Image (cartoon, helix red, strand yellow):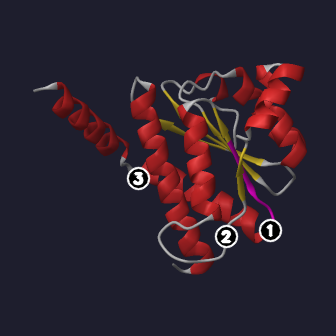
Amino acid sequence: MDDALRALTNAAELARAFATEDHASRVRKLAMMVTASVRGGGKVLICGNGGSLCDATHFAEELTGRFRADRPAIPAIAIAEPGHLTCVANDFGFDRVFARGVEALGRAGDTLILLSTSGNSANIVAALEAGERAGMTTAALLGKSGGALRGRCDLEIIAPGETSDRIQEIHMLVLHTVVQLVEKELYGV
């Protein structure tokens, strides 16, 4: 088997292993958390590092823009604005870049979604703590053992795999499924 086929086969095997009723139940719960926030006049905040930040922005734009059908915009913000990230990193340290965004934008009734392949990023842990202080509902998409975030959020979904790329692929599958379920629940599309 060559490298390309090995990579595709590995990704398919991990997705297949993830497709369990337990994981589906957790994905449905995450969609209901988002739906409840939106119905209550709240929003979704999302954060992650590196590729997970890119996934956070992708998820936010699927909610605020369009996924599969035309419908009203769903309020979501990825804490990803370069000016904010560099200002906070410079003034307070990189460990505070997401927490300051949560402090500024997060309110009780909002949902905070944390993306971390390791679950150990200090800035993601700090964001969780800021979300808790704000009274937000919290969820984490994690990988490997779940790291320091395991057991700390209202909901956790742990993707199988040992490498960040495979974990992030499962995270994006989860996020796309959440958008699909939220659209159906809120707008019947």
Count of marks, rendered view: 3
Q: What residue appears at the point 72 percent right and 21 percent down from the top-left corner?
A: 122
Image coordinates of residue 170 in percent, x first then y, are: 43, 42
Q: Report, in whole angstroms, how far the alpha carbon at label 2 lies from the one at label 3.
A: 30 Å
How packed is label 2: few (under 14 Cα within 10 Å), some, or many (20 or more)? few
Magenta highlight on residue 42: yes
- Residue that label 3 marks: 21
Determine whether 51 is above or below 170 in the image.
above
Q: Report, in whole angstroms, how far the alpha carbon at label 2 lies from the one at label 1.
A: 15 Å
Q: Report, in whole angstroms, how far the alpha carbon at label 1 lies from the one at label 3.
A: 28 Å
Q: Are marks 2 and 3 in contact (CB under 8 Å)?
A: no
Magenta highlight on residue 96: no
Q: Quadrant of the N terminus?
A: top left
- Residue that label 2 marks: 73
Query: Can residue 141 be spotted in the picture?
Result: no
Query: Can residue 101 be spotted in the picture?
Result: yes
Q: Earlier in the sequence, mark 2 or mark 1?
A: 1
Kindly identify the amino acid type of the residue bearing the numbered disc 1. Gly
SS class of the residue under badge 3?
helix
Q: What residue appears at the point 66 percent right and 22 percent down from the top-left corner?
A: 121
Image coordinates of residue 8 in percent, x first then y, are: 24, 37
Of discs 1 and 3, which sits in the foreground?
1
Determine whether 12 is above or below 85 in the image.
below
The residue stretch that appears in magenta: 41-46
In the image, farthest residue toward the front = 83
Of discs 2 and 1, which sits in the foreground?
2
SS class of the residue under badge 2?
loop
Left or right of residue 151: residue 177: left
Of discs 2 and 3, which sits in the foreground?
2
Image coordinates of residue 113 in percent, x first then y, are: 67, 45
Kindly identify the amino acid type of the residue bearing the numbered disc 2. Ala
